[in-house]
C-alpha cells in the first residue's frame, strides 16, 4: 500500500511513494497536502460475512493489514490485541458489554420501519471517541520507535479532548514524551484534573497564562524553528494524522456488521463533526465497499460543513466568527481533514485540490456549486458519496438531552445530542440510523446540569478526580522559556 499527497501532481505521485510507517510519525506531506492511499483497498461481501463474528481487535487487524502492509502481520495483530481490550474500554454503562468495545444500543424502532441506534465510542480512558484512534497510535508509535531505535517528543496545544486522549495514549510509553500546552484555568475542572493528575514522568503539562490561541501560537513559533525541532525530535498527533483516521475506519465496519445480519441491509451514520476526521473515516469505509447508505455530518452553530453540504460553498470562518458553544470540541473555523474528501470529489486531481486549498488561503474558501463564477460544479456529485448534513443549536442540545433522558432513560453528552438531533431529521423507513456517541456526559456536566437539573453519572474511578494531586507548570507565553523547558527535560 502506497500513500500519495492530496496536492501531488500526477507525475510526482508515482515517483515518491511512501509506506504506512513512513507517514506514521509525520503530519502534512512536504507539499502541504494530506496523505491518502493511492487507491482504497476493497472489501468483498464474503469478507464482510466472515468479519461479522470477529472480536473488535481481530476486525481492527483485518482492516489495518490492508493499509499498513509494511508492518509484519504478527506484530500488527499483537498491537491491535493489546489496544482493544475490555480493560481499556472499561467505562461501558449499564446495558453495554465492555468486551464489545463500541457497543450498540437501540434507542427507538418506529412503526414505519425507522430505527435509531447509538454506537458508544467513548468508553475508553478519557471518555471521548478520540481514545479509539489515539490508543492505537500510542502502541504503534512505541513499536515503530523501538524498531528504529529512535525517540519522539510530542508537542501540542489543547483546549480539552485531544490533549487528554494523547496523554493517556502515550503515558509510560518508551521513547516518547508529551509536552502539552493548555490555557491556564480555562479548561473545565474535570478536564484539567484528567490531564494534570497524570504523574507519569514522560508527561509534561504546561499551563500557559492566556487563552487557547496563545498556547497554539507557542506551538507554531517553536515548530517554526526547524533546527530546534529536529534536535529535540519534535512531532505532533493532530487530527490529520493518517493512522488516526484509519483506526477510526474500524468502528464503521463494526457498527454496520453489528447492526445487520446480511450485507443488503441499509445503514446510515450520523456523525457529530468538527475537523471532519471522524466522518472522513466513514467516507473511507464506504469507498472500501462497506454498504453505508448515507453519511450525515452534524454540526453545532459552527456550521462550515453544513453550509458546504447544503450549498457547495466552503467558507472558512475568522476566529471572531467562531462561536464558543456547549459542544466545544466541534467549535472549528475550518475542517482540517476536509481536503481528503475534496480530493476524492474532484476525481483525485492533486493539482486541482492544491488550487482549491490555495484559494482557501487567499480568498477564505471556494465554491463548487456550479453557479456562474464558481470554482467548479462537483457539488452535484456529493450525493453519490452519500453525504448529507444538518445543524444544531444550544437550545436544540438542551431539548435533545432532555428528550433522550425522558424517552430512553440515558444521559447523552452535548456533542452526541447534536448528532441525535440531526439524525432524527433524517430517519428513513428500512434504514438503520447509527449515531456515533463521541463523548460521555460526565465530561460536559455543566450543560447536563442545565438541561436536567442533576449531575451526569460519573464512571467508576472518576468520582473524586478533582481531588487527586496535580502535576503541571505554569508559564507565560514566552517562546524562549518554552524551548529552554523542553531542552532541559529531554536532555537533547
Ligand atoms: C473531536 C470531537 C468531535 C469532532 O470530531 P472531528 O473528527 O473533529 O470531526 C466531536 N465530539 C467530540 C466529543 C470530540 O472530542
Image: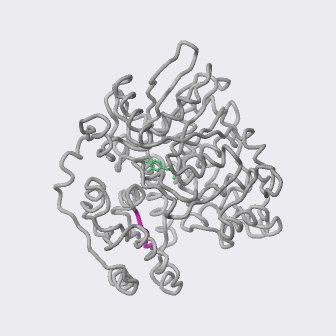
Q: Is residue 357 left or right of residue 185?
A: right
Q: Where, quadrant-wise, is the C terminus in this rendering?
A: bottom left
Q: Quadrant of residue 432?
A: top right
Looking at the picture, does residue 221 appear above or below residue 87?
below
Q: Residue at x 71, y 49 (%)?
A: 312
Q: Nearer the viewer, residue 333 or 224?
A: 333
x and y percentages locating residue 223 in the rendered image? 50, 78
**Dominant secondary structure of the magenta stretch?**
strand
Q: Residue at x 53, y 22 (%)?
A: 115
Q: Nearer the viewer, residue 160 or 486?
A: 160
Q: Nearer the viewer, residue 297 or 151?
A: 297
Q: Where, quadrant-wise, is the N terminus in this rendering?
A: bottom right
Looking at the picture, does residue 64 appear above or below residue 180?
above
Looking at the picture, does residue 246 appear above or below residue 267?
below
Q: Residue at x 35, y 85 (%)?
A: 481
Looking at the picture, does residue 424 appear above or below residue 62?
above
Q: Is residue 383 left or right of residue 478?
A: right
x and y percentages locating residue 239 in the rendered image? 52, 58
x and y percentages locating residue 176 in the rendered image? 40, 69
x and y percentages locating residue 199 in the rendered image? 24, 64
Q: Quadrant of residue 165?
A: bottom left
Magenta residue span: 151-158
Q: How many marks?
A: 0
Identify the image's colour scheme: rainbow, by chain, secondary structure or one colour.
Answer: one colour
Magenta-span inclusion, residue 419:
no
Point out the residue furthest to the top here.
111
Amino acid at each position: 500500500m502506497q500513500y500519495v499527497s492530496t496536492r501531488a501532481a500526477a507525475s510526482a505521485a508515482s515517483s515518491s511513494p511512501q509506506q504506512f510507517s513512513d507517514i506514521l510519525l509525520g503530519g502534512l506531506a512536504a507539499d502541504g497536502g494530506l496523505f491518502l492511499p493511492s487507491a482504497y483497498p476493497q472489501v468483498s461481501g464474503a469478507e464482510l460475512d466472515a468479519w461479522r463474528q470477529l472480536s473488535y481487535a481481530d476486525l481492527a487487524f483485518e482492516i489495518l493489514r490492508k493499509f499498513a502492509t509494511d508492518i509484519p502481520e504478527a506484530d500488527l495483530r499483537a498491537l491491535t490485541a493489546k489496544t482493544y481490550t475490555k480493560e481499556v474500554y472499561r467505562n461501558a454503562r449499564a446495558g453495554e458489554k465492555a468486551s464489545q468495545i463500541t457497543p450498540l444500543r437501540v434507542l427507538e424502532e418506529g412503526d414505519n420501519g425507522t430505527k435509531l441506534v447509538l454506537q458508544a465510542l467513548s468508553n475508553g480512558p478519557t471518555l471521548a471517541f478520540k481514545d479509539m484512534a489515539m490508543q492505537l497510535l500510542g502502541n504503534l508509535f512505541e513499536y515503530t520507535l523501538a524498531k528504529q531505535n529512535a525517540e519522539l517528543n510530542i508537542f501540542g496545544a489543547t483546549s480539552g479532548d485531544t490533549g487528554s486522549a494523547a496523554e493517556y495514549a502515550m503515558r509510560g510509553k518508551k521513547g516518547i514524551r508529551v509536552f502539552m500546552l493548555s490555557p491556564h484555568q480555562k479548561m473545565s475542572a474535570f478536564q484539567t484534573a484528567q490531564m494534570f493528575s497524570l504523574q507519569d514522568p514522560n508527561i509534561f503539562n504546561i499551563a500557559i497564562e492566556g487563552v487557547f490561541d496563545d498556547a497554539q501560537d507557542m506551538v507554531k513559533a517553536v515548530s517554526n524553528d526547524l533546527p530546534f525541532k529536529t534536535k529535540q525530535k519534535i512531532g505532533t498527533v493532530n487530527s490529520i494524522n493518517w493512522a488516526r483516521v484509519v483506526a477510526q475506519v474500524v468502528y464503521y465496519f463494526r457498527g454496520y456488521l453489528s447492526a445487520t445480519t446480511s450485507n443488503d441491509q441499509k445503514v446510515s451514520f450520523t456523525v457529530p463533526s468538527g475537523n471532519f476526521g471522524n466522518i472522513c473515516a466513514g467516507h473511507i469505509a464506504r469507498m472500501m465497499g462497506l454498504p453505508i447508505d448515507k453519511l450525515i455530518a452534524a454540526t453545532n452553530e459552527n456550521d462550515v460543513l453544513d453550509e458546504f453540504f447544503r450549498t457547495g460553498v466552503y467558507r472558512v470562518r475568522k476566529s471572531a466568527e467562531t462561536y464558543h458553544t456547549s459542544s466545544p470540541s466541534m467549535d472549528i473555523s475550518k475542517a482540517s481533514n476536509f481536503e481528503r474528501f475534496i480530493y476524492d470529489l474532484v476525481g483525485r486531481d492533486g493539482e486541482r485540490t492544491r488550487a482549491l486549498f490555495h484559494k482557501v488561503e487567499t480568498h477564505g474558501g471556494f465554491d463548487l456549486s456550479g453557479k456562474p463564477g464558481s470554482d467548479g460544479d462537483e457539488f452535484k456529485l456529493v450525493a453519490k458519496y452519500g453525504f448529507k448534513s444538518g445543524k444544531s443549536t444550544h437550545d436544540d442540545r438542551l431539548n435533545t438531552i432532555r428528550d433522550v433522558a425522558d424517552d430512553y432513560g440515558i444521559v447523552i453528552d452535548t456533542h452526541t445530542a447534536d448528532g441525535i438531533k440531526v439524525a432524527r431529521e433524517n430517519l428513513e423507513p428500512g434504514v438503520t440510523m447509527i449515531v456515533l456517541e463521541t463523548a460521555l456526559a460526565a465530561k460536559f456536566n455543566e450543560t447536563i446540569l442545565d438541561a436536567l437539573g442533576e449531575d451526569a453519572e460519573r464512571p467508576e474511578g472518576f468520582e473524586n478526580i478533582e481531588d487527586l494531586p496535580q502535576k503541571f507548570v505554569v508559564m507565560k507565553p514566552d517562546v524562549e522559556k518554552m524551548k529552554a523547558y523542553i531542552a532541559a527535560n529531554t536532555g537533547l
